[in-house]
Image: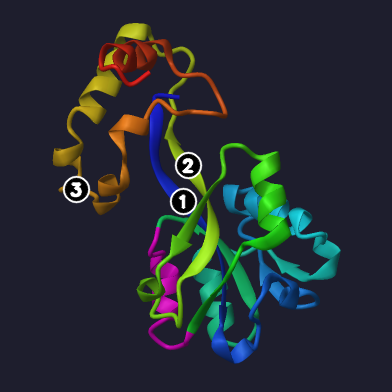
Amino acid sequence: AIGTLYDQYIQVVTTEKSGIKSFDDLKGKRISVGDANSGVELNARAVVKAYGYTYDDFKVDYLSYGDAIDAMKNGQLDAAFFTSGIPNSAVSDLATTEKVVVLPLDGDGAKTLLEEHDYLGEATIPADTYNSAEDVKTLTIPNLLVASPELTEDAGYEITKVFYDNLDKLEKSHSAVADIDRDKAADVKVTDLHPGAKKYFEEEGLL
């Protein structure tokens, strides 16, 4: 890894008219877990397991964000998993026609996930994100900037330096850059830091 970027929020989204208010209410419902074997689907599988269920307890579809939103609008789907920064544009689109409900990921299920996956964190999705009734607790997973192991140390160093020294300029191109914390960029738990990135962070006193 070159370094950590911003957190993605695990969002289990439904609508007020569905009557679903908790994760347990999803049992027997039609849910989308994202494209098969995608990051979203892997997260969904871990969440389902942590809350004591399997896919057999639901009517599972493997849909993209856009298709999941369309299916919810058409009454063909009850809920869907989204793993992204906030707000997610597809969920925001749903919020233009429906009252969006984001289910809380807390309690024993969340505790199990945090114990089993040390890269997960806790966070709150503010109510005004999708014009929801209240803030919602959920879990986050970090986005990483990843390099090929074949990238030379010098090139890895230059990429890391150019990127993390210029976050203020990059933010003008993508608002999510505002959520990148340079001081925590070297905090990578799921893989090794690239040697060039490690050199940069050591020089900057960030490792």
Q: Are marks 2 and 1 in contact (CB under 8 Å)?
A: yes
Mark 1 nearby-residue class (10 Å; few <14, some 14–19, many ≥20)? some
Name the colour scheme. Answer: rainbow
Q: Please give the residue where the numbered disc 2 appears in the rendered image.
A: 142
Please say if the residues under marks 3 and 1 sit with CB atoms less than 8 Å apart.
no
Disc nearer the start of the sequence (3/1)? 1
Q: Residues within 10 Å of mark 3 (few under 14, many from 20)?
A: few
Q: Residue at x 62, y 56 (%)?
A: 35
In the image, residue 37 sits, relative to residue 63, either above or below, namely above
Of the residues shown, which amino acid type is indicated by label 2? Pro
SS at circle 3: loop
The answer to which of marks 3 and 2 sits earlier in the sequence is 2
Q: Nearer the viewer, residue 142 or 71?
A: 142
Q: Which residue is mark 3?
A: 173
Q: Looking at the rendered structure, which numbered label has been put on residue 8?
A: 1
Please indicate whether residue 195 sits to the left or right of residue 42 in the image. left
- Residue at horizontal 55 percent and vertical 24 percent from the top: 191
Q: Residue furthest right?
A: 56
Q: Which residues are magenta?
A: 86-99
